Image (cartoon, coloured by chain):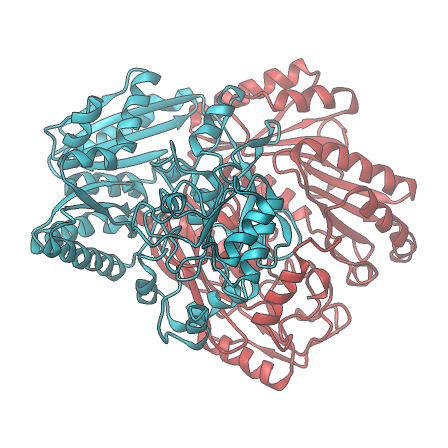
């Protein structure tokens, strides 16, 4: 029996846009972190008008609204917790405008990250944020979580590359923001707000000019700690390459088995370095970094010969999490960040925590940013293992906070980490954030049960979860 | 008396000046002012206080100058935590010891403070190369009118932990809260810096500017300066000059200079003057100082923002409007960021006041995103500092009401009277 809500959506948008059958809805109940319940309905809008219509109907029926890109999020951010309307941007996936002279493009939120870069590559420009999920994740989803990626080390995360937005507010009204506007920076607030402030329907992105030269090098180390020491030393010497990534032996072997990319599979840890810029700087840059790496225990060093080999190395690195599927039935990937000098110390602690909980951990991470991603292997059918993963995950976050770090570098807070937010921020800090939420979303219509902790953290925050 | 008072705003003086020594005290003062119905204007070095309208009420000047410490700095992290009242020059000094820098690119760094520069939403010429200040800001603490201190972000370079509140306070002109702490990503200092100045006569201009966009090694700053002779040297008696900055390794800067000379030469540019190291930095700083430099009490300076590809056209449009009123015209067109800085001055303050209403209306008509940046307070009070409010004005107003319900903080200074 169709509910009033479902009937109204279908009436207004047609059954091609509005999905209300359980068999269809199952596709919108999960992300890379968790399986939730089915939403009450899902819509696949064709344009901003469809989005506004869906928002108005959902509000009138008092249903929460959950935006969704490709569903690759890793913190439950796009998962419906208590029914509601999932708005999938899969069909709003076009590149609308490309302005090479001013290095900007306007895109729809459902455009896949890599497709943007591929579409514009011949124009001599590129879109810098490159999360490992870039082959499937959408720019809209990336905006929601302020996604990072290996190349954010020198180029910055998504928020540094967004020039303006169009969004639909809780009442179904459409607004446009731009960085040059007089007034408060609405663009900067919305990026990284995980779909809790409105539904982004167009995105103006900043493009960068392709560098004259690129070099990708691979170094082998005895263990993760010495590779981490090398990374801290490279940054400490005032060298910021384009990317500085570490993979430990477990990850490297899984990756090699799958991709045959040529990583030294016997090494305790592999450091992947990319430098880019004027051709004249490549040799000196490589020499300098290689020397620091050797001083910190690198046993081998080699540079990729050409663009094809570089592409294989990056493809393998970005496929690391997937390759782990060969080793264990399930894995859980943690995301946290520490000051760069604390990297060796935190990696030792991760190792100890895993040992304490008898867990196998792989490490594949954006070392140059101090952004770690311990990947814990487990079997979902074993309750003890599941509990161990949860406990170890919390201990790793606590260790990062104790070292002056934070609980998410690029994946977001979502559903998963909302209770941990109060470990990083005081009641006063959270109250200021809740004020922004109050203004943008007074009815708590957008993605409730995300980011903000539940419970009586403070009046405003508690209220934000009451709806 | 008023002119010499550092806390004067237009013709108004505050009833009281507060100079708290710690962040908690700033928050307490704000709460007390809100309770008492007084209004507060935060002060750093007063270098960019000319941005925005004069506040409707002005009771308390809140100076941040005693919050002037480096709170946290391990050069190996390439991050730094600062109190808001520290001057840009002091920050540069602390970072230079480890060959690091933050490209504030703001006028008068000896006086300008970190908090003031952020609150003003300042963006200088090298932001096209190094990112905007908002992009380098990784954490902040603000004092709010309910007496609380609210932190956001942290001391890590990647962070999606809660809302990115720092973005809200950057450019808010002290109308939501008072920034008391700012954490930044620092950048490694390039080994070499070179500044080139070339005469850019009308006959070569178009070809030269087109050639610039084809350079393999991009300049970190590229400005066309017309006038501002007291700040930026004249070359070959030409009023219009191209100011280019290259930064990087020695070998790259040398190559960039050769390429530049070659393309400019082919475009018909007679000669390129070069400055290195400290001299280059000084010439760049002088040019940035010019952005807000008044001519006695008879000038007003506008900033027009927009696409880089339209900056020259906007500068010419503004020139035509100003010259038609027989006023003096100086401008800087930033061909990388799209900023156009336009200074208008009559022969006397009276003359400027007479022509200003018409010039202002025509500039606004021709250049939609235009704001007042600097100038004599009397001239500034004659016009609206802001262009038309953005489409999100209702939301901006609601944010102001939520953060500052009693309109304690610089009421009326910001766009739309918030």
| Residue farthest toward the front in the current orientation of the protein | A1
| Residue farthest toward the bottom in the current orientation of the protein | B36
Viewer-proximal residue, B229 or B77? B77
* Residue at horizontal 76 percent and vertical 37 percent from the top: B314
Viewer-proximal residue, A246 or A375? A375
Locate the N terminus of chain B by quadrant.
bottom right
Locate the C terminus of chain B by quadrant.
bottom right
* Residue at horizontal 40 percent and vertical 43 percent from the top: A24
- The answer to whether A403 is drawn above or below residue B342 in the figure is below
- The answer to whether B247 is drawn above or below residue B4 in the figure is above
In the image, which lettered chain appears red?
B
- The answer to whether A274 is drawn above or below residue B81 in the figure is above
> Is residue B66 found left or right of A11 in the rendered image?
left
> Is residue B395 found left or right of A84 in the rendered image?
right
Residue A141, image quadrant: top left
> Is residue A6 found left or right of A283 in the rendered image?
right
| Residue A316 percent location from the top left of the image | 26, 28
Viewer-proximal residue, B267 or A466? A466
Q: Is residue B106 visible?
A: no
| Residue A350 percent location from the top left of the image | 16, 51
| Residue A378 percent location from the top left of the image | 14, 47
Viewer-proximal residue, A50 or B61? A50
Q: Is residue B349 visible?
A: yes
In the image, which lettered chain appears cyan?
A
| Residue B197 percent location from the top left of the image | 64, 30
């Amino acid at each position: 029996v169709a509910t009033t809500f479902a009937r109204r959506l279908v009436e207004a948008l047609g059954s091609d846009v509005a999905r209300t059958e359980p068999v269809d809805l199952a596709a919108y109940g999960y992300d890379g972190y968790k399986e939730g319940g089915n939403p009450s309905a899902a819509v696949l809008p064709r344009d901003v008008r469809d989005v506004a219509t869906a928002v108005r109907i959902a509000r009138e029926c008092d249903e929460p609204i959950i935006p969704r890109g490709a569903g690759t999020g890793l913190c439950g951010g796009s998962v419906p917790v208590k029914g509601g309307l999932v708005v999938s941007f899969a069909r709003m996936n076009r590149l609308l405008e490309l302005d090479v002279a001013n290095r900007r493009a306007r895109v729809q939120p459902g455009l896949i990250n890599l497709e943007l870069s591929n579409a514009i590559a011949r124009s001599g420009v590129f879109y810098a944020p490159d999360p490992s999920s870039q082959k499937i994740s959408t720019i809209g989803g990336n905006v929601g979580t302020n996604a990072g990626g290996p190349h954010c080390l020198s180029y910055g995360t998504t928020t540094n590359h967004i020039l303006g937005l169009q969004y639909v507010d809780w009442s179904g009204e459409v607004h446009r923001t731009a960085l040059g506007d007089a007034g408060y920076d609405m663009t900067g607030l919305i990026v990284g707000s995980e779909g809790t402030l409105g539904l982004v329907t167009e995105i103006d992105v900043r493009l960068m000019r392709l560098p004259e030269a690129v070099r990708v090098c691979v170094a082998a180390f005895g263990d993760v700690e010495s590779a981490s020491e090398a990374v801290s030393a490279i940054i400490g010497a005032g060298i910021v390459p384009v990317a500085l990534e570490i993979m430990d032996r477990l990850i490297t072997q899984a990756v090699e088995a799958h991709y045959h990319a040529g990583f030294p599979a016997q090494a305790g840890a592999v450091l992947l370095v990319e430098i880019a810029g004027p051709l004249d700087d490549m040799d000196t840059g490589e020499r300098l970094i290689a020397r620091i790496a050797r001083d910190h225990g690198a046993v081998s060093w080699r540079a990729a010969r050409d663009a094809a080999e570089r592409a294989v190395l990056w493809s393998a690195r970005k496929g690391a999490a997937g390759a782990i599927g060969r080793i264990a039935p399930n894995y859980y990937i943690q995301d946290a960040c520490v000051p760069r000098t604390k990297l060796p110390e935190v990696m030792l602690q991760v190792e100890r925590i895993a040992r304490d909980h008898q867990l196998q951990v792989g490490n594949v991470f954006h070392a140059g940013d101090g952004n770690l991603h311990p990947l814990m292997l487990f079997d979902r059918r074993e309750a003890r293992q599941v509990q161990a993963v949860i406990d170890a995950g919390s201990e790793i976050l606590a260790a990062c906070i104790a070292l002056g770090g934070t609980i998410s570098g690029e994946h977001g807070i979502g559903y998963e980490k909302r209770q941990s937010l109060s470990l990083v921020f005081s009641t006063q800090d959270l109250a200021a954030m809740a004020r922004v939420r109050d203004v943008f979303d007074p009815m708590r219509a957008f993605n409730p049960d995300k980011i903000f902790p539940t419970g009586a953290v403070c009046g405003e925050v508690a209220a934000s979860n009451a709806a | 008396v008023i002119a010499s008072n550092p806390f004067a705003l237009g013709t108004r003086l505050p009833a009281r000046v507060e100079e708290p020594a710690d962040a908690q005290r700033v928050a307490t003062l704000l709460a007390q002012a809100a309770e008492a119905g007084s209004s507060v204007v935060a002060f750093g070095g007063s270098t960019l206080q000319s941005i925005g309208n004069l506040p409707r009420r002005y009771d308390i000047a809140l100076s941040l100058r005693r919050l002037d410490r480096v709170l946290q700095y391990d050069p190996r992290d390439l991050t730094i935590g600062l109190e808001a009242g520290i001057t840009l020059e002091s920050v540069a000094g602390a970072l230079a010891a480890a060959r690091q820098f933050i490209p504030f690119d703001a006028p008068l760094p000896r006086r300008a403070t970190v908090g003031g520069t952020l609150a003003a939403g300042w963006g200088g010429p090298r932001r096209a190369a190094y990112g905007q200040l908002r992009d380098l800001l990784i954490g902040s603490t603000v004092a709010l009118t309910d007496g609380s201190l609210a932190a956001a972000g942290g001391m890590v370079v990647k962070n999606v932990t809660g809302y990115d509140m720092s973005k809200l306070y950057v450019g808010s002109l002290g109308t939501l809260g008072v920034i008391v702490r700012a954490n930044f990503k620092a950048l490694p200092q390039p080994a070499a810096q070179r500044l080139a100045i070339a005469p850019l006569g009308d006959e070569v201009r178009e070809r030269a500017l087109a050639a610039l966009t084809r350079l393999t090694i991009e300049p970190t700053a590229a400005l066309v300066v017309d006038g501002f002779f007291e700040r930026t040297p004249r070359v070959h008696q030409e009023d219009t000059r191209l100011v280019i900055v290259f930064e990087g390794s020695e070998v790259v800067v040398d190559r960039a200079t050769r390429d530049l000379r070659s393309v400019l030469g082919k475009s018909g540019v007679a000669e390129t003057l070069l400055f290195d190291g400290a001299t280059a930095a000084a010439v760049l700083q002088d040019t940035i100082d010019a952005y807000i430099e008044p001519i006695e009490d008879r000038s007003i300076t506008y900033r027009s923002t927009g696409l880089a590809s339209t900056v020259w056209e906007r500068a010419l449009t503004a020139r035509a409007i100003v010259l038609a009123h027989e006023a003096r015209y100086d401008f800087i067109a930033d061909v990388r960021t799209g900023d156009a800085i336009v200074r208008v001055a009559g022969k006397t303050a009276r003359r400027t006041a007479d022509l200003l209403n018409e010039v202002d209306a025509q500039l606004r008509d021709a250049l939609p995103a235009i704001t007042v940046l600097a100038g004599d307070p009397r001239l500034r009070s004659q016009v609206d500092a802001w262009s038309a409010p953005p489409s999100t004005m209702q939301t901006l107003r609601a944010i102001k009401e939520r953060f500052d319900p009693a309109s304690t903080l610089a009421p009326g200074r910001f766009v739309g009277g918030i």
